[in-house]
Amino acid sequence: MKKLLYTLVILSFIVGFCGVCVAYDESGKDISCDSYKNDYEDIIIKKGNENEKVIALTFDDGPDEVFTPQVLDILKKYDVKATFFLIGEKVPYNKKIVKREKEEGHEIGNHTFTHINASKKTYEEIEEEITKTQEAIKDVTGEYPTIFRPPYRALSRDLCKIVKEKNMNIVLWSNIDVRDWSNPGVNNMVNTIESKVENGNIIILHDYNTVRNNKSQTIQALEIVIPKLKEQGYKFVTISELMEHLKK
């Protein structure tokens, strides 16, 4: 028993040293904790003001040469502003699209350089991914992003520390994830959003899809759900605007 406990203590130390909070009880049961997140509550954004009918549409994994322009066309048609979290390595190949995002009033955020799982990476690897993406976006827009979204919603103490040191906010999402990357069906996506939408929601979508066709399910769903939500009185805002509403 002592040997088992000794092994578990050593394992806990090793994993904890790598940036993941892990603990075990006397029986060896994993009672993992995320207590470090409490230290960074001030930079983690999950939702906006629940007293106002505001919504933030966010798009991950772009820019995409086919789908992103279609998303931008729909947003322009309905006079909606959104936030795009970009993959750094895609930016140099899609500079015109990134410039269009900025010129049309949308917000641009950092989504790492190669879409890593930060909870499985070292401090140095995470910092390089974020920094390279910051530089790639600044090279096109002239500005460093102030918001960051972790792929897979994966967090670690190292990630939080790096983001805070760069004076950025970590942006997650609220209760709506239609998993559009899995192509669940246009009606399914629309119904999920309509049935779960709440004041201050941050909705996660993707302007990239591995299924290549003329029009992704996400784009088809946007054409339906945006006018419906506007009819219900919802105002679409960027993440920075959503954060401003939190201060009211």
Image: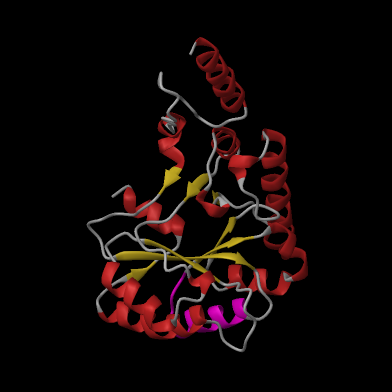
Q: Is residue 68 magenta?
A: yes
Residue placed farthest to the right in the image?
93
On the image, the x and y values in percent for residue 196 come to 28, 67
Q: Is residue 241 above or below residue 193?
A: above
The answer to which of 5 and 16 lies nearer the viewer is 5
Residue placed farthest to the top in the image?
2
Q: Is residue 85 magenta?
A: no
Query: According to the image, what is the colour scheme of the structure?
Result: secondary structure
Look at 74% across and 58% down and name the residue there. 139
Range of magenta residues: 67-81
Q: Is residue 44 above or below residue 56?
A: above
The answer to which of 47 and 118 lies nearer the viewer is 118
Residue placed farthest to the bottom in the image?
214
The answer to which of 199 and 248 lies nearer the viewer is 199
On the image, the x and y values in percent for residue 166 come to 60, 39
On the image, the x and y values in percent for residue 160 come to 54, 37
Is 240 left, or right, of 95 in this rendering?
Answer: left
Is 19 left, or right, of 200 in this rendering?
Answer: right
Look at 30% across and 74% down and name the residue there. 194
Total marks in image: 0
| Residue 78 shows in this picture | no
Q: Is residue 210 above or below residue 237?
A: below
Is 171 left, or right, of 247 in this rendering?
Answer: right
| Residue 206 shows in this picture | yes
Q: Is residue 11 above or below residue 193?
A: above
The answer to which of 149 and 168 lies nearer the viewer is 149
Q: Quadrant of residue 114?
A: bottom right
Look at 54% across and 23% down and name the residue there. 12
Main SS category, magenta section: helix
On the image, the x and y values in percent for residue 237 come to 40, 65
Look at 48% across and 13% down and name the residue there. 1
